[in-house]
Image (spheres, grey):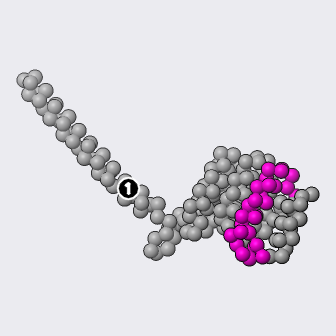
Amino acid sequence: MQGKHHSRTKQVRMHLTTCLMVGLLSVALAAPTFAQASKQLVTPEGPSWWAQNLGEQLATLLDSPVEANKQEGLQHCLHFAALYSDEIDLSAAVPKLLEIYDKDPVEGYRIMALSALHEIGDQESMFALLEQVAQETSPRVRRLTLATLASYAQEHRYFRENLYVRNTMADLAVGP
């Protein structure tokens, strides 16, 4: 009697193991397809719903009083601006990024905001940085801002050839 029970238990275990293996294999095979479909920023119908709202969501995250949220928002801004700037409009986050650049007491956050603004490549934000850098007290942030503006000028003819930009950059290069 015990032999039949042991044999039956062994069969049940084997069946459960087989089901589990088939289930795991199905999930493993389906995961890349699901991940690829869910990560698409732009579909034939246009931008995905989350890509359309990402700028506003990041602006909300950047406005959080919780430091970890602000830091995460800055990291996401950098990530999406660097990798998907042609596909996603992050302009809704630009005012908050400019505010962080101008007023945040954490220099690292200010530099991250500067980098994100450069990656987004918004012309208005570059003009705002040009205005703000003259009052910059941190030598590191000032130097990085000037390098960012020079890089942007190399990439954008209008900005580079703008007389105001050229004169201001020349004045700033000489220093106070």
Q: Main secondary structure of the magenta part?
A: helix
Near mark 1 (Cα within 10 A), the count class, few <14, some 14-19 or many ≥20, is few
Q: Residue at x 26, y 43 (%)?
A: 21
Q: Residue at x 82, y 71 (%)?
A: 165
Q: Is residue 66 left or right of residue 105?
A: left
Q: Is residue 157 visible?
A: yes
Expressed as whole percent of the image width and height from the top left, the position of residue 110 reads 75, 52
Q: Residue at x 39, y 58 (%)?
A: 34
Q: Is residue 151 magenta?
A: yes
Q: Is residue 111 magenta?
A: no
Q: Is residue 2 left or right of residue 93?
A: left
The answer to whether residue 6 is above or below residue 153 is: above
Identify residue type, mark 1: Pro
Q: Is residue 5 left or right of residue 144?
A: left
Expressed as whole percent of the image width and height from the top left, the position of residue 47 reads 51, 70
Q: Which residues are magenta?
A: 135-161
Taking the view exactly as shown, the residue that stands out farthest to the right is 176
Instruction: Return the residue nearer the eye: 152 or 64.
Output: 152
Instruction: Return the residue nearer the eye: 150 or 104.
Output: 150
Q: Which residue is mark 1?
A: 32
Expressed as whole percent of the image width and height from the top left, the position of residue 139 reads 83, 50
